Amino acid sequence: MSLIAILTEALNFFRNHIRQLAALTLPLLLIQVAIQLWLGNEMLTADPENPQFGASHAAVMMLLLLVFSVLIAALTLFLELRSQGHELSSGQILKASLPFVPPLLLAGVFSGLAILAPVMIFAAFGPLWLIGLVVSLYLFARLAYVNFMVVVERLTPLEAIKKSFSFSAGSIAFKTIAVLMLYVPLSLFAGVFTQLATQVGFPLQLMVETLFAFLGLFVNIALFRLYMVNRQPAEADK
């Protein structure tokens, strides 16, 4: 299936299920964005010569990772159930997604370290950081399916990382990169509107950033569609 066809189907799915997606994800996104804004404000107000980050900041960071893992687990489970023709309430999906949170959290930490490692290593060599950034972006594309492997395939974190890397080989990697590039214009628009909202006040800024975070879920839906299209032949052979 062509990339245009995949994006079209993802857009139709997003549009047709926008109410349930909003009911399922907006509360979690609101909490996630609020935490991110608080952490960002703490970094801006910290003394650059002697920054003080204590246990409270570490606890908030862990809470952020936990909320994000619940969000991804619930969204992925919703996509899987709808692809199978099942209909569950948002509460039922959230409850069913909780067992996937620990493995998703571990998989996120492991894959995140793998993605950040190249840019951090190459940053030690000055201008070569750009090479590290390219490698990190490529690894990001190859590991973009880890969440699906954990929730849909029921794999362990390490197995999910290995399976995502093997699954995204060849042309799938380039299609994945193309889908992930949708974050660029979305981030640019979000930056412009966030700047305008900041001048009004925190509540509007929170709502604007939450809205764009919700729109960003379209990328996850497109990746899931790309994943489903390319795993169906393998399932048919079973």
Image (cartoon, rainbow, N blue to C red):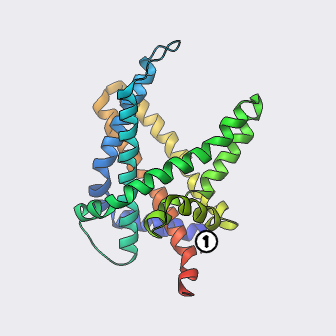
> Residue shown at 74%/41% (left/top)?
131
Q: Quadrant of the C terminus?
A: bottom right
In this image, 92 relative to 208: left or right?
left
Residue 41, image quadrant: top left
> Residue shown at 36%/53% (left/top)?
71
Q: Where is residue 140 in the image (x, y as percent from the top left)?
A: 60, 51
Above or below: residue 75 compared with residue 120: below
In this image, 139 relative to 61: left or right?
right
- Considering depth in this image, is 26 or 50 the residue closer to the camera? 50
> Residue shown at 48%/59% (left/top)?
147
Residue beneath disc 1:
2
In this image, 36 relative to 178: left or right?
left
Q: Position of residue 207 (x, y in %)?
A: 31, 39
Q: Position of residue 233 (x, y in %)?
A: 58, 82
Q: How many marks?
A: 1
Above or below: residue 25 compared with residue 77: above
Residue 56, image quadrant: top left
Q: In which quarter of the image is the N terminus?
A: bottom right
Above or below: residue 59 compared with residue 48: below
Residue 132, image quadrant: top right
> Residue shown at 33%/65% (left/top)?
17
Q: Where is residue 74 in the image (x, y as percent from the top left)?
A: 35, 59
Above or below: residue 160 compared with residue 45: below
Q: Is mark 1 on a helix, strand or loop?
A: loop
- Considering depth in this image, is 71 or 174 the residue closer to the camera? 71
Q: What residue type is labelled 1?
A: Ser
- Would you call the spot at circle 1 few (<14 residues within 10 Å), some (14-19), or many (20 or more)? few
